[in-house]
Structures are given as C-alpha cells and as structure tokens.
Image: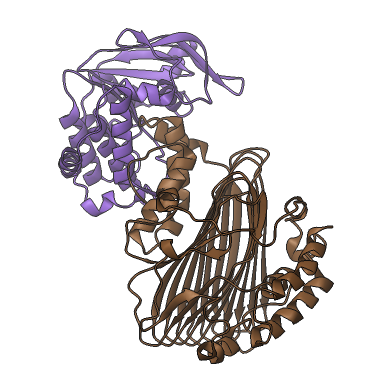
Chain colours: A purple, B brown
C-alpha cells in the first residue's frame, strides 16, 4: 500500500531523513518509535506533503503510484491522512464546516457529486458517537480553546469522517488521559480494516497496549535502525534507547 | 479650472434649483464660504496623512447631471437585497427614482430630503436636526453647501420598523464623470427600532466621485442597525461621512463592508450625549489591485456609563492599501466608560500595506479602555492543516480568510444580507465554499 524507498530529506540544509525504507501493507498497523529528534514527525509531515521539507532522493509510493510530487491536498484525495501532533487552531471556522468542505473537496477531486446533506448529517452523528464527542463540539471553531484531549479526539474524528487508506497518527497519545486514550484507541481500532493501514508514531508503549502493532520500527538519526514485532516495543519500554544507539555505533 | 473652483462657481447655478429663502439655504451659503476657505483636505492634514485625494480630484466631474436617466429593474436587481420585503429609496445620478423606490409617510417618514426640506410641516424637525451632528471640515461643508437630495427618515417614538430600508445610489454613466453629493438625515425617536442598508453603485466604467454625508440621531432607548455595502467598481470613489448622535440607553451598530472601489474613505463619528449608550462599529475590508480603503473613526464618550466596541478586519492583496485611524475620546465626566477597539489585518502580498493608528484620549480616571492592532500573514501551519484534509490551496486560503472575518459577520442581523455579503466575499476569493458564516 505505502512504500517508502531510500528516502532522504532536509530542511534548511539540515539532513533529517537519511534513507528510510518502509513497506506498509493493507490491513497492517506499524509503530514507529525512537528518541526525540530522530525524525519521526518529519517523516509523518513529509508523507503528508508539507512543503517546507525537501526530498533530496528516494520515493514514496501509494498503491504503486509515486506521490512525492503531489500537493498535500492531492495526497489527501488519494487517501493519506495525518493526525497532527499539534493540531492547529483556526478561529472562525467550525468543525462541521471544515469537515464538510474537506469531504466535498475530496469528492470533487474524485469526480463525485457533493455528499447529500442528509447523508452528511448521519455521518457526522455516527462518527461523533464513535469518538464520544458532544454534538455541541462540532459547532465550535476548529481546535480553538480545545483541551489537549479534545484536539486529539477531533483528529481521530476527522480520520473517521474522511476514511483514509493510510492514516499516520503522530503522537496521538501525548496529552491524553487514560479515558481519552481508550476512546481514541477504540475509535482507531474500529476504523481499522483489511483495506487500510495505520502508522503510529509514539514514544510510549502505552498506546500499543490498545492498538496492537504488527510491526515496530525504531527510527534513529533519520534512519530505521531496527524493526521487529510488538515485543520490540516492550523491550524499548523496559530498556530505553541507549542499547539501540550502542548497536548503531558498532 | 480645478474642481474646487468649479464647485464654488457652480453654487450660483445650484441656487437656481433650490428655494433660497429658507433656513437650510442660510446654512448652505455659510457652508460654501467655509468650503471656499478650507478646500479639500490634503495629506498635510493629520487625519488625511495616508489618503491622498489628488488622483480622484483630478477629474473634470459634472457636478449636476444633465438629464434624468430611467433605469429598469432588471438592470439594478442584483444590487438590491431583493429576497426580503423592504423600503427602498433609490437614486440615479443623484436624482430620486420613484418607480424603483418604495417609500412611506404612513405613521413615519421614509422618503426624500427634497420633499421635506422646504415644507413648513417639517421645519421644526429640520431646524432641530439638520447639520447638527457634523464637524465643519471642508468635505462636509462642501456636501452641506449642495445638500438638496438624499434619504430622509423620521421614525416616531415606540415604533418597531419591521422592514429594513435600503438606500441605494446608482451612477448611470450618462455623464463621462460625475460627482454626487447625497445628504441623508435619519431621526429615530424614543424607543424605536430601525435597520438600514446603504449602497452606492457605479453601473459602468465612467468615473464617479461620491461625497456622501449622513446624520443619524438615535434618541433614548432606540436601536439602530446600519449596514454599509461598499462593493463598487474600480472607477468609483467615495468619501462617506456618517455622524451619529446617541441619547440615553440607545444602541447603534454600524457595519461597513468595504469590498471594492477605487478610493474609499469613511469618516465615522459617534457622539454619546447620554448615559448607558452602546456604540458598535464593525468592518470587513477585503481589497486588491490598487484599491484604497481608509477607516477614520471617532467615538466621543461624553457622559458616564457608556460602551463602545470597534472591530475592524482587513485583508489586503496585490498593491492595495488600507488605513485605520481610530480615535476614542473619554471626557472627564465620562466615568465607567468601557471602550474597546481592535483592528486586525492580513497582508496577502509583499506590496500591500496598512497604516493603523489607534488613538486614545482619556480624561476620566475610572474607565476601561483597550485597543489592539495586528498585521500578519496567513498562518502557514493552518494552511497545511487544511490542505492535509484535502482542501485545495485556494479554498484553504479562503476558509482561513472567512474564519478571520467571521466574528464581524456574526453580528449581521439580517440573514439575507449576511448571505449576500458572504457570497460577495466568496466571489472575490474565487471559491464556492458551500456554507454561510
């Protein structure tokens, strides 16, 4: 589904990714872990199409098609979704208007008609129930005055509405209390299917108790230095990252 | 002959058209003298520092239209808010157009200045209110000198006027260039309520300069909602002077939507002559190319326990320029005043500019006054956020600008007007967002 080959990238002349290789198949959950500053969020932003980063070499393919020259919106239309580590506050634009616009622009790009109002309402209702979101929340301005937990829940709500094929969740667990974490994880698990894939970027094993990964990768100095199954995450939780750094050095 | 000389010398011709043995004409005669000595404002005048009239005064305007022009409804329909029931006072080239208008004298006067100026019945009211709210600067005195036509509205006490009033001035383009000087007088007696929409529209590519003056008297416990739509073409310039006098417990809200025109200057003054008054000024300016919009506001807090709120948002593209000059004066007697002023701007291009200057002059010691202005660009992270959800760049920018302007739109109380403004904005941004603010 998503295939990243030998990806190098830099920002302001600083190399951040130094040859990433990653194969994500439909139905899989991948976790990307690693110490601070290893390039995890950069990787997420680059896949989603943030323009400040420059890809110097390598490929990102989605379903066999190269996407690295596409704009962020075109990637979204093809099914890429990024749950932001720090969702942006946009005063004056309600969550509902935002999500309606996003859905209809995506449909327009695919040559489809706008979603009928009735269908949209039902979808909004179903998905807000899934994330245990109060309907009042939908008429508030996007992330404006939201708590950390509300922001993250809003991200997963958007994911539920947009039904992406590859969802990248960038530290969605940070800032969540245990109840909110459960709700968010439950939402993600319900959205998971054999037709889509999830990439979790996280510092902690905690999230992986709820959303169980098929593969765990360690990103260090802009490179995936180790991959394994879910046991690798447990090992990292127990031992930290120093032993990995040692391995890389040797 | 420059425009000033032309105007001064045409005053004699003007006197042939009006009743010179009247109260108002004495005021006019005084005013033309004042205009002759003061003239048009120049950049040397502090409040005109960032707005030069040079380029608009350089045209040889006709000061009286040479003939009556009939317009058909279909030609002007789109400039009306036609999906609501409303009173309409419509002028073409400064001349009242009865077949397009809907006025009344039943229980209230929603009519023409020319029909009341010389009638004995209206003499007490004219003597009481005409020219009483204005500063005697060159521009205003010029309008006063030639004051003859415009809207006259008098709402008696305890009257809730259900239908909004639309005052619309068209320039037909019959003159190669025309100067218009409408003069409006609006009096709302005690405990009454009124909504007004005002618009000026040039119908072709010929130059038009409008020097409009409106006096509004909001008597005790009355509520006035005034909306100015400034969405004219690139040959149209306007200097709009609106002076509002408020009495005890009255509320007056004025929205100005400056969305197009060659040069737009708004002189807006609120004088609070009683207590427990609320004065609200809101504005959205979205302009591009070489357009220029200048908002000059003055709130005069004279008595205690009053409030004023100003919220002006501006979005400037290409080489457009904006000015916001907001003065709040709090007199010594005006204790417990609450005065707020905000002016936020977004510059979309390196060549666009805004000069924003808040001025507070406070002589009382127990007041709450605040002011703030910001100038920025669209937030890149917000743009990426919207794009990452599949919203294309153009729509994403539009959504951010909509959001930016939204709290001004929220206070528009006529839904059809709100739709219209939203559509004008969407059209300007080249998008169809598919929802209203």
| In-image side of A119 versus B93 (left or right) | left
Quadrant of the snapshot with the N terminus of chain B = bottom right
Q: Is residue A238 something that shows in the picture?
A: no
Along the viewing direction, whichever of B75 and A243 lies nearer the viewer: B75
Task: Residue at 22%, 34% (x, y): give it.
Answer: A115
Up-down: is B35 above or below A85? below
| In-image side of B201 versus B297 (left or right) | left
| In-image side of A115 versus B384 (left or right) | left
Up-down: is B47 above or below B316? below
Q: Quadrant of residue A217?
A: top left
Up-down: is B4 above or below B156? above
Rendering coords of residue A238 (x, y %): 31, 28
Q: Quadrant of residue A189?
A: top left
Rendering coords of residue B96 (x, y %): 51, 66
Rendering coords of residue A92 (x, y %): 41, 51
Along the viewing direction, whichever of B241 and B236 lies nearer the viewer: B236
Along the viewing direction, whichever of B35 and B430 lies nearer the viewer: B35
Along the viewing direction, whichever of B153 and B276 lies nearer the viewer: B153
Q: Is residue B271 something that shows in the picture?
A: yes
Q: Quadrant of residue A232?
A: top left
Task: Residue at 24%, 44% (x, y): give it.
Answer: A180
């Amino acid at each position: 589904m998503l295939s990243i080959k030998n990806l190098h990238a830099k920002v302001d002349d600083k190399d951040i990714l130094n040859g990433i290789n990653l194969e994500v198949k439909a139905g899989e959950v991948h976790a990307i872990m690693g110490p601070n500053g290893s390039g995890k969020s950069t990787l997420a932003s680059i896949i989603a199409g943030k323009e400040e980063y420059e890809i110097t070499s390598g490929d990102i393919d989605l379903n066999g098609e190269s996407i690295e020259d596409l704009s962020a919106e075109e990637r979204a239309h093809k099914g890429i979704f990024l749950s932001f580590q720090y969702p942006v506050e946009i005063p004056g634009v309600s969550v509902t208007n935002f999500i309606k616009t996003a859905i209809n622009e995506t449909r327009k790009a695919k040559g489809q008609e706008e979603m009928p109002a009735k269908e949209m309402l039902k979808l909004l209702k179903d998905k807000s129930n899934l994330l245990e979101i109060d309907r009042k929340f939908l008429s508030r301005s996007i992330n404006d005055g939201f708590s950390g937990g509300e922001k993250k829940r809003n991200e997963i709500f958007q994911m539920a509405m947009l039904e992406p094929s590859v969802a990248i969740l960038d530290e969605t667990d940070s800032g969540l209390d245990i109840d909110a974490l459960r709700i968010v994880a439950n939402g993600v698990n319900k959205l998971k299917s054999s037709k889509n894939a999830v990439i979790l970027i996280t510092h902690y094993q905690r999230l992986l108790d709820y959303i169980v990964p098929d593969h765990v990768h360690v990103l260090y100095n802009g490179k995936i230095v180790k991959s394994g199954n879910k046991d690798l995450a447990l090992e990292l939780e127990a031992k930290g990252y120093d032993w990995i750094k040692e391995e890389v050095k040797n | 002959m420059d425009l000033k000389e032309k105007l001064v010398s045409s005053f004699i011709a003007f006197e042939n058209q009006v009743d010179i043995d009247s109260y108002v004409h004495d005021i006019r005669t005084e005013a033309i003298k004042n205009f002759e000595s003061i003239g048009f404002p120049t950049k040397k005048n502090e409040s005109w520092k960032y707005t030069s009239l040079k380029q608009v005064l350089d045209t040889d305007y006709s000061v009286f239209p040479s003939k009556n022009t009939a317009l058909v409804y279909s030609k002007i329909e789109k400039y009306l808010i036609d999906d609501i029931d409303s009173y309409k006072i419509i002028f073409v080239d400064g001349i009242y157009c009865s077949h397009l208008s809907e006025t009344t004298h039943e229980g209230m006067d929603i009519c023409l200045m020319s029909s009341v100026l010389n009638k004995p019945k209206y003499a007490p009211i004219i003597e009481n209110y005409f020219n009483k709210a204005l500063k005697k600067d060159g521009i205003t005195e010029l309008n006063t000198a030639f004051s003859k036509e415009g809207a006259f509205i008098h709402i008696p006490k305890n009257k809730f006027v259900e239908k909004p009033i639309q005052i619309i001035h068209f320039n037909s383009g019959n003159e190669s260039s025309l100067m218009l000087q409408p003069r409006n007088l609006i009096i709302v007696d005690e405990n009454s309520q009124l909504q007004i929409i005002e618009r000026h529209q040039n119908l072709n590519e010929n130059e038009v300069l409008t020097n409009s003056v409106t006096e509004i008297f909001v008597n005790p416990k009355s509520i006035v909602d005034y909306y100015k739509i400034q969405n004219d073409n690139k040959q149209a310039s306007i200097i709009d002077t609106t002076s509002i006098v408020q009495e005890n417990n009255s509320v007056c809200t004025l929205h100005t939507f400056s969305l197009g025109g060659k040069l737009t200057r708004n002189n807006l003054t609120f004088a609070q002559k009683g207590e427990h008054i609320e004065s609200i000024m809101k504005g959205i300016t979205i302009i591009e190319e070489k357009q220029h919009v200048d908002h000059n506001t003055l709130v005069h807090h004279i008595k205690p326990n009053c409030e004023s709120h100003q919220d002006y948002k501006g979005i400037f593209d290409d080489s457009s320029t904006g000015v916001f000059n907001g003065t709040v004066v709090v007199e010594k007697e005006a204790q417990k005043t609450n005065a707020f002023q905000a002016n936020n701007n977004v510059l979309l291009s390196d060549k666009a500019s805004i000069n924003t200057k808040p001025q507070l002059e406070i002589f009382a010691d127990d007041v709450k006054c605040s002011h703030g202005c910001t100038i920025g660009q669209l937030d890149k992270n917000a743009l990426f956020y919207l794009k990452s959800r599949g919203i294309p760049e153009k729509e994403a920018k539009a959504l951010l600008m909509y959001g930016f302007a939204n709290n001004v739109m929220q206070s528009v109380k006529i839904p059809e007007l709100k739709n219209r403004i939203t559509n004008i904005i969407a059209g300007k941004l080249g998008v169809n967002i598919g929802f209203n603010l």
